[in-house]
Amino acid sequence: MHQTHSGSATPAAPAEDKAMRHNHYRRLLIMAVLSLIAMYILMYAMVNTVDNIYPNFNQFYMAGLMVAPMVIIELALMRAMYPDKRLNALIITVSVIGLFAFFMLIRQQTAISDKQFLRSMIPHHAAAILMCERASLQDPEIRTLCENILSSQQAEIDQMTAKLRELER
């Protein structure tokens, strides 16, 4: 609807209405891309120190795995904003394929070379260290377990970091 000079509302022109609808789809794409980037970065929140942040394919696969259902949920919950049923069906199909593809990339460890493996495992181990360092644990057995985790995970991080440096030469 548009406001006229007299203040009364008039319906939007069909071409303008179509452009506005396509703008919603463009924003959905932008939201998906920005969410992928945000999720990729935010997964490193579990790392105990910046030194243990290593960009890797597994983090990208996980971010993609999370974005795919987010797009489907957006289309389902905000149906009025996305009236093009054929385009919605296409987007949902692509999202389902993406969901399955990212799931399989993770499960099959596709493109995970020796270096990519180490780049994935260092942040993973660093997350275990962070949890043990920060959790308010009361049970003595769990506290002992965490002490062991701290030393073993740090030793493995040190070993993996050294090996990664060697492989990157």
Image (spheres, helix red, strand yellow):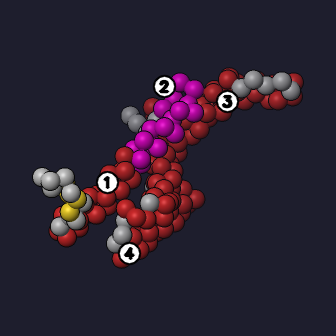
Residue under circle 1?
A: 27
**In the image, which residues are magenta?**
35-53
Q: Which residue is drawn at 49% across and 46% down?
A: 59
Q: Which residue is drawn at 58% across and 59% down?
A: 107
Magenta stretch secondary structure, dominant: helix
Contact between labelled residues 2 and 4, with CB atoms less than 8 Å apart:
no
Q: Residues within 10 Å of mark 4 (few under 14, many from 20)?
A: few
Instruction: Give percent across and percent down for residue 100.
Output: 52, 66
Q: Is mark 2 on a helix, strand or loop?
A: helix
Q: What element carries label 1?
A: helix
Q: Can residue 98 be seen in this view?
A: no
Residue 52 falls within the magenta-colored stretch: yes
Q: Residue at x 49, y 60 (%)?
A: 77
Q: Distance between the residues labelled 3 and 2?
A: 15 Å
Q: What residue type is labelled 1?
A: Arg
Residue sitting farthest toward the right = 140
Quarter of the picture containing the N terminus is bottom left
Is tag 4's residue or tag 3's residue first in the polypeptide sequence?
A: 4
Instruction: Give percent across and percent down for residue 68.
Output: 47, 59
Residue under circle 4?
A: 85
Residue under circle 2?
A: 50
Mark 1 vs mark 2, foreground winner is 1
